[in-house]
Image: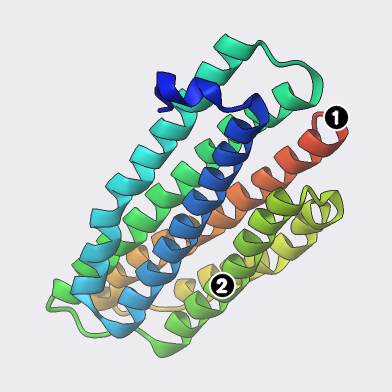
Amino acid sequence: MFDDGELRKTFHERLQELDNEVLRMGSKVGEAVDLAVQALYDRDAKLADEVMEGDDEIDQLNVTIEESAIALIARQCPVAGDLRLLTSILRVTLHLERIGDLAFNIAQLAKGIISSTRKPGKQDIVDLIGEMHSHVKNVLNQSLKAFADRDKKLAKDLHRLDDPIDDLNRRLLKKLADYRDEEDFNWIVDMVLISRWLERVADQAVDIGDQVRYLVTGKIIE
């Protein structure tokens, strides 16, 4: 949180600092998702631990940004575009914090899979998870770029980019439904969860895009 010494800075300088902190948080969240999926692929328990341990820093960034934004609203009573920016920052960081939690969940489950004595799962399913992750990474990166550039076109396009992720999730569920081996049951449940969490990461990124459109236009996106 900004201390009293920060009051000598102009209001817009402090806004810019907050803006930068949101992007820093976005970068950390994106890295957490990437490493969580990599931990699953590489069967790397230490990498999964790294993601889980890093979640505290993401949570703290969320708290710091939230406290700072609320303090600016209380002290400066901003209006119009500045108020929209501060409220957008609060909402965007909430979505980023949720993505961080989803990365934590993936890493935690990956570690459980790695430490189990179960046989490795079907490669075609793992490949679908990897394909989903590639699309999710693209959506998340574009949502952060849209926020950084205040680009409503990029933000609006996120809905289209999300469609292949939903399709892949349905394909994965259909493939999993074909497996009949009881030994695969726990692994199937794990893959359903990871697929769902990746889909939710993309949904949160799309929501960030909708918030960018509100920031730019002043219109709430349903």
Across and down, in percent, residue 181 comes to 30, 79
Name the amino acid type tagged 2.
Answer: Met
Residue 152 disc label: none
Tell which tag, 1 or 2, sits nearer the viewer: 1
Across and down, in percent, residue 218 comes to 84, 29
Camera-side residue of 207 and 174: 207
Q: Residue at x 76, y 55 (%)?
A: 159
Direction from residue 182 to residue 94 in the image, left or right: right
Quarter assignment of residue 213 = top right
Q: How many marks?
A: 2
Q: Determine whether 125 is above or below 20 in the image.
A: below
Q: Determine whether 104 is above or below 76 in the image.
A: below
Q: CA distance from mark 1 to mark 2?
A: 31 Å
**Quadrant of the frame with the C terminus:** top right
Q: Residue at x 49, y 61 (%)?
A: 30
SS assignment at label 2: helix
Camera-side residue of 57 and 105: 57
Camera-side residue of 4 and 131: 4
Across and down, in percent, residue 50 comes to 25, 64
Direction from residue 20 to residue 54 in the image, left or right: left
- Asked if the residue under mark 2 is in contact with the one under mark 1, i.e. CB atoms within 8 Å, the reply is no
**Residue 215, can we see it?**
yes
The residue labelled by disc 2 is 132
Residue 219 disc label: 1
**Quadrant of the frame with the N terminus:** top left
